[in-house]
Amino acid sequence: MPSGIRTRWCADRITAALAGELAAPTADSATRIRITQALVELTGTTAREVLRRLAHDDDRVVALVASALFRVLDERPPEDRSGDDP
């Protein structure tokens, strides 16, 4: 598997695992906020999509953090989005 495809595959698996933790009924607000912050470090559109959905989360604090982080990612110049899917 070429390294670019492998990297994207790994990022998608990590994102899926984090999204699962976010949906867990036992996850407290602080944990969900930290996981939301971690999504910013991942490349690709999958993490951005999870952040976009979290911007409408029932937990207002999680929604505010996700919304702010999504805006920051969205405002990055295209050359700074090196891992984003086309």
Image: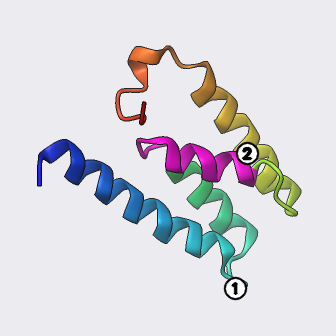
- Give SS at disc 1: loop
Q: Is residue 44 magenta?
A: yes
Left or right of 60 on screen, residue 33: left
How many numbered discs, if any? 2
Q: Position of residue 27 (x, y in %)?
A: 68, 78
Say what secondary structure mark 2 lies in. Answer: helix
Look at 53% across and 49% down and name the residue there: 47
Q: Position of residue 51 (x, y in %)?
A: 65, 48
Residues drawn in magenta: 40-54
Hey, what amino acid is under mark 1?
A: Thr
Q: Residues within 10 Å of mark 1 (few under 14, many from 20)?
A: few
Q: Based on the picture, tell me whether residue 75 belongs to the magenta stretch.
A: no
Up/down of 14 relative to 5, above or below: below
Residue 21 placed where, x, y %? 58, 74
Which residue lies under the disc numbered 1? Answer: 26
Amino acid type, residue under disc 2 in the picture = Val
Q: Main secondary structure of the magenta part?
A: helix
* Structural crowding at the residue carrying mark 2, measured as other residues with C-alpha within 10 Å and reported as few (<14), some (14–19) or many (≥20): some
Which residue lies at the image location 42% right of the left edge and 30% below the top edge? 86
The residue depicted at 42 percent of the width and 36 percent of the height is 85
Q: Is residue 58 left or right of residue 11?
A: right
Above or below: residue 71 compared with residue 60:
above
How far apart are the alpha carbons under marks 1 and 2? 20 Å
Q: Report x, y in % for residue 16.
A: 49, 66
